[in-house]
Image (spheres, rainbow, N blue to C red):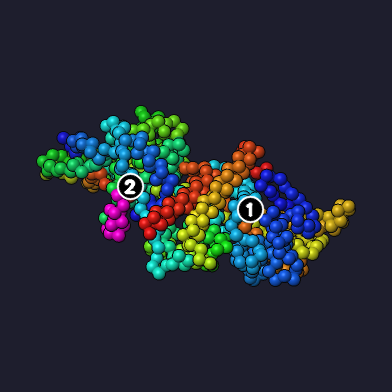
Amino acid sequence: MVVRRSNGDVVESFGSSREVTAPEHEITMTMNGPHQPTNPWAPLTPEQQEARKVVNVNAETVTNTAATDIPGHYGPEQDDSWNLERFRDNFRIDFHHNKPHDAAFSLVGCDASISNAFRRILLAEVPTLAIEDVFMFNNTSIIQDEVLSHRIGLIPLTGGEKGLRWLRWFRKKPPTDDFASQAAYDADGEPSTPSDYNTVVLELKVDCRWATEAEDGRDGKKLAKEGETDPNVRYVNSNVYARDFRFLPQGQQGTYFSGDDAIRPVNPDILIAKLRPGQKIHLQCHCIKGVGMDHAKFSPVATASYRLLPQITITSPILGADAKKFARCFPKGVIGLEPSDESDPDSEPKAVVKDPMKDTVSRECLRHDEFKGKVKLGRIRDHFIFSVESTGQLRSDELFLDSVRLLKAKTERFKRHLAEFEEGR
Amino acid sequence: MSREQYNPAPLSQGGNAGGSSSQQQTTGGFNITGASNTFEDTSRPVSYLCGDCDTKVLLKGGDAIRCKECGYRVLYKERTNRMIQFEAR
Amino acid sequence: MSQQNGDVEMEDDMAGGAEQNGTENEDFLKEEQRLRLLPNSTTTAASFAFDKEDHTLGNALRYVIMKNPDVEFCGYSIPHPSEAVMNLRIQTWDGVSVYEVLRKGLEDLADLCDVVEDKFIAARDDFDASQPNGEAS
């Protein structure tokens, strides 16, 4: 058993000596109350504490699914009340990888309601910049104006982080046919006017034409007569890509979004439309900040998800051919084979759990009679393997931090409202 | 003057009062409108696009409907260059 | 539109933006009251309505409030999916005020967020220092 203390020391102890392993508050508790196994109100033993962290995954059922860390669940002597110090001591974050577009880490020691709040905020409440209004000057391509508008709206944009954080909300008027939101909108305040601190302007202006000797070094029409079929050779600008967007800095935006920090699509190679000679697209876009609950284009993540850490317990040794079969019941790397006798490397192989993180909890091993009663599957209730895949506007790890700050901002806001409310009462 | 050469009168910068930094040049991109860009005059030539060779064909009332380059008889009307606003949703 | 509903972070930022751009008062409106007390509430058993909130705050707040030993019952509901309202019910033991319980719940949740943020930054910086390419060895 390993206990982490707030000073960072790791106290390790073996056996069942509770006085060493238990945190301070539990020691005082055991000294105050009689601690006998017969006492129906006795606080949980360390083994019971561990057991209640596991959700059992059986062949056909799941059991012990609900969290029980609520005061009173086990009677008055089990202390499950909120304790910041205890949370700080038990809570842990382990990183698995941290790349701008993909971060994975474990949150250990918190409840599902908390990690779910972070996940939901990541999906729907972290603000990002996206194309919102499209001003179509000309579009003679075969893709219709409204389809094209919808399509370019979904292109993830990026730019200098400092500038993106400097941008403010643009308060947009609701659609004229939505009376309910219009009433709420009018009661709330004035609409914004586009300005450099709330609107980013992009332009897309592409003309497709035949390739000419003078401009492109090849005569597309001549090549076509000779049998050339590749549109990239015959024409110029036959494909419109996200990289063709031009950023038009307004006002102070030039200082925030210059050089490498310019507003641009995350992926320059997104194909927006295909053109043929004579067709053209000319439009300007207004990009504003929004949140994912309004439209998915504002969601800063491609996915943000978590799963519980799988637990595989081999209760009695699985040896020989059975061990190999057992390993095949799991994804690669989950189960390892070791000699059953440590001193003899040639002894019969024994199945050991190597990396439960890689398991998918497929329950395949529970279908075979030879493993009956030898293995238990479960998931750790308070170990969340989080995965955040950013669309590229902000770094994945920064996004998670934003979600934590946003949840805190929510609590602070309602603390203010509660104080205000009590004043008026 | 053809429709393409017509330039609408510059708009007042009224919609742009929000930013103190609004030099007309840098924030002009916010003022997008094509509302006044719509007058019609039947005595002036209208340009069409040849359905075969994509060249511009200027036709007045009473002209033969025929491409001056290749003689093709299918001509397409050009799309209006009036600005239309969409929501990217 | 419900999108610009609850982002305190951005609203705080607005102050800075307005200053920089000389448009005072444009974005400075009194923060609307989003907490209401539902009828038939007493000081030990009350239902609160949180406007423009959902499961995100509802479930997290329910959890920390249930962690309070003075609380007999705490639960939340979203009465109608088309209305951005979240109701939170609190009942307390021994005459403890529901307002105190709610305040403690909000404070505890804020403390929790601070711990998560600190630990996350520490873990991330440790990891980045040991794995500059972002991948675990």
Question: Which chain is home to disc 1?
Answer: A
* Above/below status of B67 relative to A293: above
Q: Give the residue at x 63% y 48%.
A: A94
Disc 2 packing (10 Å; few <14; some 14–19; many ≥20): few
* Residue range (magenta): A177-189
- Looking at the picture, which amino acid does disc 1 mark? Arg
Q: Nearer the viewer, residue A103 or A275?
A: A103
Question: The N terminus of chain A is located in which quarter?
Answer: bottom right
Task: Read off the residue under disc 2.
Answer: C29
Residue A82 screen position, x and y as percent: 59, 57
Task: Read off the residue under disc 1.
Answer: A86
Mark pair 2, 1: CA separation: 40 Å
Residue B53 screen position, x and y as percent: 28, 41
* Above/below status of A82 relative to B60: below
Q: What element carries label 2?
A: loop
Disc 1 packing (10 Å; few <14; some 14–19; many ≥20): some
Q: Which of A279 and A202 is in front in this view?
A: A202
Query: Viewed as shown, does residue A249 lie left or right of B57?
Result: right
